[in-house]
């Protein structure tokens, strides 16, 4: 549709290029661990760094899935009144993932 209008293309291109642009990179393992620890903290949970590291290496690497698992752990932690320690996380997620 814009092929016949080079002026519009150039104008649109310059408008879209204005301002800052950012290249988003996927999270590495350290970033996934930091995400889990930060989200746990925001939920009012105390999560051991070893538990986050275990989740990253033994569960899905997809950040959305990791946060779903964290929500599940939040419920289990509340129900059992246990903190998110490595043994607890393994117990809850070991067979699930």
Image (cartoon, helix red, strand yellow):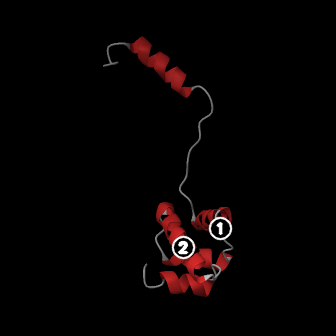
Provide the secondary structure element on which disc 1 rests.
helix
Residue at horizontal 63 percent and vertical 82 percent from the top: 82
Label ID, residue 48: none
Q: Label 2, on which residue?
A: 75
Categorize mark 1 by other alpha carbons within 10 Å: few (<14), some (14-19), many (20+).
many
Q: Residue at x 48, y 61 (%)?
A: 64
Q: How many marks?
A: 2
Could you say whether the residue bearing mark 2 is in a helix, strand or loop? Answer: helix
Residue located beneath label 1 in the image: 37
Q: Gap in Å between the C-alphas at discs 2 and 1? A: 16 Å
Residue ID at (58%, 83%): 80
- Name the quarter where the C terminus is drawn: bottom left
Q: Specify whether 87 is left or right of 13.
A: right
Where is residue 18, by image quadrant?
top right
Q: Can residue 54 be seen at all in this image of the molecule? A: no
Label 2, residues with CA under 10 Å away: few <14, some 14-19, many ≥20 = few
Circle nearer the viewer, 2 or 1: 2
46 relative to 73 in the view: left or right: right
Q: Are marks 2 and 1 in contact (CB under 8 Å)?
A: no
Residue at the image point whose x is 34% and y is 18% from the top: 2
Residue 43 locus on image (x, y percent) = 64, 64
- The reply to whether residue 18 is visible in this rendering is yes
Return the x and y of residue 20 as percentages of the image width and height. Answer: 63, 33
Q: Is residue 44 left or right of residue 68?
A: right
């Amino acid at each position: 549709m814009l092929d016949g209008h080079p002026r519009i293309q150039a104008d649109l291109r310059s408008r879209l290029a204005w301002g800052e642009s950012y290249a988003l990179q996927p999270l590495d393992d350290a970033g996934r661990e930091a995400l889990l620890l930060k989200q746990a903290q925001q939920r009012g949970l105390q999560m051991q760094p070893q538990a986050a590291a275990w989740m990253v290496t033994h569960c899905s690497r997809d950040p959305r899935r990791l946060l779903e698992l964290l929500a599940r752990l939040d419920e289990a932690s509340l129900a059992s009144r246990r903190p998110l320690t490595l043994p607890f996380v393994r117990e809850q997620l070991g067979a699930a993932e």
